[in-house]
Amino acid sequence: MERLLRLTGFNGLPKAAPQDVLKHPDTGETLYVSSLALLKMLRHGRAGVPMEVMGLMLGEFVDDFTINVVDVFAMPQSGTTKMLDMLHQTGRAEMVVGWYHSHPGFGCWLSSVDIATQRSFEALNDRAVALVIDPIQSVKGKVVIDAFRTIGPNSLEFSFLEGIQKTLAPTQESRQTTSNLGHLMKHSIVEQLHGLGKSYYSITISFKLTVKEQQMLQSLHMKNWAEGLQLNSFEKITKNNLTNMQEMVKMIKLYNKEIYVLSKKPYDEIGMESKTEKSKRIESKTEKSKTLSKAEIEAKQVGHFDPKRHLATIANDLMKDNIVHELRSMIDATAFQ
C-alpha cells in the first residue's frame, strides 16, 4: 500500500477526517430528440447492420436542464468543420451537442472505447452527450435508445487522502438524481457490468413532436376510400387462385394422412391370436379411442404442423380475395358502362 501511495505521489495517510463537499454531479437533465433525428439515426443504424455506425448530433443547450437535438449526420464525413460551415450557410445555427452510435443487437451501454470517445467530446464541452441506439431490438412503438455522460476522473480519486480537491462526498453515492422527470427505466445487469453508475450515468430522453411532425407521421400510412375500389389484374388473381388451390390439395393430403395415423392402433402385438380375442381387443380399442380421441389428437398436435388449421386459413383467404375481386369488378363495370 505504501508503494502504491509513493507511485501515485502521496507520502502518507491523512490525519483528519475527510470533509463532505456539497457540490455533487447533477443529473436532472432531459435530452429532447426530434422525430427527424430519430428517423435518421434508425435508418443509419439499420443500413450498417451488423457493423456499428457513428454520427454527430446537432442542436442546442437551452438551459442547464434541457438539451435539444434537432438533426444528425453520419460520420465519417470529409470534414466535420466543413459540414458545420455549410449548415451555417443554409441558416442552420445549431452546434454539436454530442454524438451517437449503434449497438446492433446487444443493448445500450458504453464500452471502454466509447467512454474514451465520450471523454474526448466532454473535453470540448462538459455537457456533451453520448447516445446509443439499438436498431435490431427496436420495433414499432418502442425504440431501444439511451443517452449517457461520463462521471469524470475526479470520482475515481482517493477520497480518504489529504490535500485533494474532492468533488464527491465520501459517504454518498457517486452521483445524485435531482429531477423526477421522465419514467423510471430499469437498467439491465449487462449495462451495470459495463460501468453504468460507476464510469457513466444515464440521462432521461424525451421525444417532442411539433404539430406538423405529428400530421406528417400520422399521414404516412393513411389509407383513403379509393384504395378499397382498386381492381387487381385478372392474371395476378388467376395465378394466386392456382397457387392456393395447389396448397389446399397438399393440405388435404396431409390431413388425410394424419387421420389415418391417428386411427391406427397405438401398438402392434406380436404373435397369433384367436378371432374372439381379436374382436374383444378391437372393441376395447374402439371404446378407448372414442373416449380419448380428442385428448390424443390435441397431444399429438402440440408443436407440430397442423394441416387442418392451415387448410382453413388458405380457404378463408381464397374466398375473401375472390369475393372482394368480384365486387370490385362489378362496381367498375357499373360505373364505366
Image (spheres, rainbow, N blue to C red):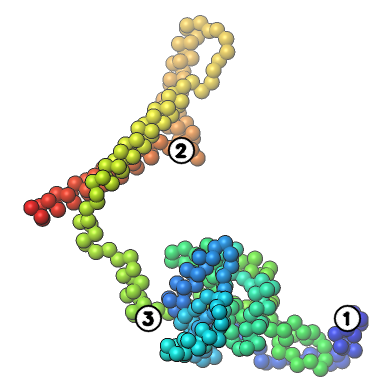
Q: CA distance from mark 2 to mark 1?
A: 67 Å
Amino acid bearing label 3: Thr
Q: CA distance from mark 3 to mark 2?
A: 49 Å
Determine which of the numbered discs, if any, sits on residue 210 in the image: 3
Q: Relative to residue 130, is residue 91 depicted above or below?
A: below
Q: Give 295 or 251, whichever is nearer the viewer.
A: 251
Q: CA distance from mark 3 to mark 1?
A: 57 Å
- Give residue 5's quadrant in the image: bottom right
Q: Relative to residue 14, is residue 142 depicted above or below?
A: above
Determine which of the numbered discs, if any, sits on residue 4 in the image: 1
- Give residue 191's quadrant in the image: bottom right
Residue shown at 44% from the left, 16% from the top: 283
Q: Is residue 320 visible?
A: no
Query: Dot 2: few (<14), some (14–19), or many (≥20) neighbours within 10 Å?
Result: few
Q: Seen in the image, is 84 located left or right of residue 195?
A: left
Secondary-structure class at tag 1: helix
Determine which of the numbered discs, if any, sits on residue 205 in the image: none
Amino acid bearing label 1: Leu
Residue shown at 51% from the left, 91% from the top: 63
Q: Which residue is mark 2?
A: 305
Secondary-structure class at tag 3: loop
Q: Seen in the image, is 178 located left or right of residue 258?
A: right
Query: Dot 1: few (<14), some (14–19), or many (≥20) neighbours within 10 Å?
Result: few
Secondary-structure class at tag 2: loop
Q: Reading the chain from its start, which is encountered first: label 2 or label 1?
A: 1
Residue 75: x, y in percent?
55, 76
